Image (tube, rainbow, N blue to C red):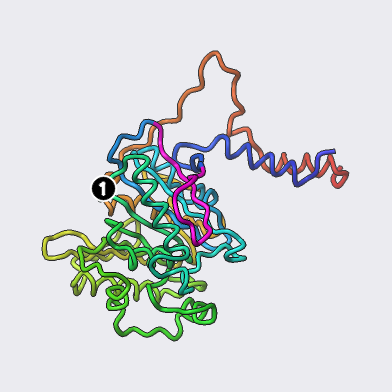
Amino acid sequence: MRSISDTIARYGAAVAAVRTPGQGGGELVPLEEFGRNPGALRALMHVPADLPAGAPLVVVLHGCTQTAAGYDAGSGWSTLADRFGFALLFPEQQRANNPNLCFNWFVAADTRHGGGELESIREMIVATVDRHGLDPARAFVTGLSAGGAMTSVMLACHPELFAGGAVVAGLPFGTAAGVPEAIERMRGRGHNRAALSDRVRAASAHRGPWPAVSVWHGTADVTVDAVNAAMVVDQWRGLHGVGAPNVTEQVDGQVRRAWHDAAGRAVLEEYAVAGMGHGTPLATSGDEACGVPGPHMLDAGISSTYRIAAFWGIVPAVAPPLPAPAEPAAASAPPRAASRLDPAATINDALRAAGLMP
């Protein structure tokens, strides 16, 4: 007899099989033999078919309790990569390193030059750019929560690698040493606001130009307090030498502030997503839609994935219309239509099979 859990799992797989072009994620494949790996991380990739030489690279760092594939499916990065032509690299944490699968952004050994997770990710990036003929001047990094905090680490310690970054519900660089301090900083407590930019300057010999940074945070986030977003902004305002925002506007109902340098280049932006808790903001409809809602993947009516990529200049500023779903080939067997998938009926069938429902 098929179990209830098995039936529900099969239903979930059927839903995944009929996702629309704006949803889901692509297949991730392992990146083998990428060099030194002192942080003992896994590396996975998504490279669209027929990707031309000189394409951009986006490095994506998942949050705690997440996997690379799970975060990709939720955020929709590989959907966007297939649509607009760029490569993706997904470093993945291992439970032996952190039982909650968090990147260790608060551990000195993992956040200093030449060692730990920082060095593993750097080695992955160099190998990926080389093997796939990508443009080293158009490499970017983004992450959620602990992945967002590790994004701050990557941008601070290896700014020469990145044209831009995006910190989603994350923390500034250099604010915690050890688990107790990390928890306090996540709660918005005990922060030292002095010399935020100097901490980044001290992390490497780099003196500019600095990566352009996009900052996203929910105003109702009780996991990582929104004071951290303000501190990430202050950290990068100091590095870019900008003062008050040049632009304050509404984008898809959310407040966006942006800072431009003396040459008029957008070097920093911040989205404060009203009423949103801890997670990555998604849009599930419209031409910018990509990804699938789930734990910490939140339908906020705005696609952080698309807007971040647009800020970096690797997708159009205004999204073109999504392509219509492809028609099935005439000679092929008719697929199960998505509209016929009835979750209530599927679960009820499972209950009847188990003798729990007449």
Q: Which residues are magenta?
A: 30-49
User: In this rendering, would 347 be left or right of 110?
Assistant: right
Asked whether the viewer can see residue 319, the reply is: no
Tell me where residue 171 appears, x and y as whole percent: 41, 71
- For the N terminus, which image quadrant? top right
Instruction: Please name the residue shown 39% across and 57% down the image.
Output: 122
Q: Position of residue 157 (x, y in %)?
A: 34, 67
Depth check, front residue: 110 or 230: 110
Q: Main secondary structure of the magenta part?
A: loop
User: Percent position (x, y) of residue 14?
Assistant: 63, 36
Residue 180 image-quadrant placement: bottom right
Residue depicted at 26% across the width and 48% down the height: 317
Residue furthest left in the image: 263
The amino acid on which the numbered mark 1 sits, given as a three-letter code, is Ala
Residue drawn at (51%, 39%) of the image: 27
Q: Which residue was labeled with disc 1? A: 317
| Image side of residue 185 versus residue 12, left or right | left
Is label 1 in a helix, a strand or a loop? Answer: loop
Where does the C terminus fall, quadrant-wise?
Answer: top right
Residue 307 on the magenta segment? no
- The total number of labels drawn is 1
